[in-house]
Image (cartoon, helix red, strand yellow):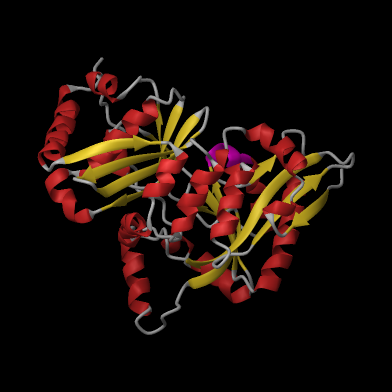
């Protein structure tokens, strides 16, 4: 079996019928929807370059599709605090230390999903070998120092481990936290909790009410476009600046274009103090799942109101009402999300340095740069 491919420089040039034919084999991966790529390409063109590939079998049938992108990355993004401190100290003398241009198989955003679909009947080893050759060529042309495939769960890695024979290393990424949506709303969820966990939530909610804060849920496209201003976007930027694992800072137009491209599918959970928005959570709603994407906070209100906790409680309440199977909470705030009843899915990436010296450095410092994430215990939060 030999495979051919078509390489595109823009999502607007892609053969959409062929792309959708492959996409239908993985309806659970909402981020392979072409509307996601349209949003990213239009709003991040100043920071990244993008390519899209469709692979075809001998009979001309589409067998796989993927997206590639370049981005400037801090190689220590998932390193331990001790390693990050060492990296930051070195940057006092070499400001660009471990800031490298990367060619991703995937998009340069923190969503915990990959952007590669290979159909069940396709020979994934041949496709991965062909894809590796394409990426090596692009990396050389774009002067990318690393090639990274991100992010795959252990089942997906059963196939992707073929990359190990092509010189890649498999590294730990941040795990995804997901929640089985077996309750109709937050009230029924709380009723099922043991008293200890329910009391913690009630205590936090009383602080929220005492601080004079209120919640509004919004899915209406036009109304979201009216309220999502540059001032509101600063709440998101505050969270990015505080994040320990910061990959990208998305522009304000990303959120606005996402709402336009997914009309009435983007849910904003808003927290108001008087008439001012002081926190928000942005989620993407699909028929199967709700995906928490990004949030924004006024941290000055957190101590008196537990604003983050209450934002997540309110977002969970509305997500449960969407009547989906699962809610994906994202890749941060591990302990808090575990205490809500989420479970962890380990995620992995595949990395290869371009050139002998960089490849040697990545291999020698691999365990420091990509440590295994600390295990978060599962909590027995429900009554029998």
Residue extending farthest to the right is: 59
Residue 323, placed above or below residue 50: above
Closer-to-camera residue (358/336): 336
154 part of magenta stretch: yes
Relative placement, left or right, of 28 versus 380 is right
237 left or right, relative to 130:
left
> Residue 132: x percent and y percent?
71, 57
Q: Nearer the viewer, residue 109 or 154?
A: 109
Judged by its main secondary structure, the magenta piece is helix
Look at 69% across and 71% down and name the residue there.
Answer: 140
Q: Residue at x 51, y 28 (%)?
A: 288
Image coordinates for residue 99, horizontal then vertical, percent: 48, 72
Give left or right: position of 360 versus 86.
right
State which region is magenta: 153-158
Quadrant assignment for the N terminus:
top right
Which residue is outermost to the top? Answer: 384
Picture coordinates of residue 170 (x, y %)?
A: 55, 53
Give whichever of 140, 310 is nearer the camera: 310
Residue at 73% over, 66% down: 137
Q: Is residue 166 magenta?
A: no
Residue 88, horizontal then vertical, whole percent: 34, 73
The answer to whether residue 172 shows anywhere in this view is no
Q: Residue 166 appears in which quarter of the rendering? A: bottom right
Number of numbered discs visible in the structure rendering:
0
Please identify the quadrant where the C terminus is shown.
top left
Image quarter of residue 383: top left
Q: Quadrant of residue 354?
A: bottom right
């Amino acid at each position: 079996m030999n495979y051919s491919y078509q390489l595109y420089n823009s999502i607007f040039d892609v053969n959409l019928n062929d792309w959708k034919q492959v996409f239908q084999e993985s309806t659970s991966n909402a981020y392979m929807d072409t509307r996601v790529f349209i949003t990213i390409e239009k709003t991040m063109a100043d920071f990244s370059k993008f390519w899209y590939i469709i692979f075809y079998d001998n009979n001309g049938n589409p067998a796989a599709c993927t997206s590639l992108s370049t981005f400037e990355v801090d190689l220590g993004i998932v390193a331990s605090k001790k390693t990050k401190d060492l990296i930051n100290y070195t940057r006092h003398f070499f400001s660009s230390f471990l800031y490298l241009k990367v060619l991703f198989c995937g998009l340069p955003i923190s969503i915990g999903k990959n952007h590669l679909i290979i159909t069940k009947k396709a020979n994934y080893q041949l496709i991965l070998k062909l894809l590796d050759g394409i990426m090596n060529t692009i990396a050389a042309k774009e002067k990318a120092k690393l090639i990274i495939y991100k992010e795959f769960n252990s089942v997906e890695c059963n196939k992707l481990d073929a990359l190990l024979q092509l010189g890649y290393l498999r590294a730990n990424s941040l795990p995804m936290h997901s929640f089985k949506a077996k309750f109709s709303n937050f009230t029924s969820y709380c009723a099922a909790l043991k008293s200890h966990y329910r009391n913690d939530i009630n205590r936090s909610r009383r602080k929220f009410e005492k601080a004079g804060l209120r919640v509004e849920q919004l899915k209406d496209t036009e109304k979201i476009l009216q309220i999502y201003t540059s001032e509101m976007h600063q709440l998101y930027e505050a969270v990015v600046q505080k994040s320990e694992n910061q990959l990208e800072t998305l522009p304000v137009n990303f959120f606005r274009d996402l709402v336009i491209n997914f009309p009435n599918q983007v849910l904003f959970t808003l927290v108001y103090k008087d008439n001012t928005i002081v926190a928000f959570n942005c989620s993407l709603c699909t028929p199967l799942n709700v995906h928490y994407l990004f949030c924004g906070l006024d941290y000055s209100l957190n101590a008196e109101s537990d604003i983050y906790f209450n934002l997540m409680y309110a977002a969970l309440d509305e997500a449960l009402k969407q009547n989906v199977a699962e809610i994906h909470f994202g890749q941060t705030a591990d302990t808090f999300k575990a205490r809500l009843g989420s479970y962890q899915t380990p995620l992995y990436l595949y990395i290869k340095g371009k050139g002998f010296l960089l490849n040697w450095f990545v291999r020698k410092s691999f365990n420091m740069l990509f440590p295994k994430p600390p295990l978060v215990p599962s909590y027995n939060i429900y009554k029998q």
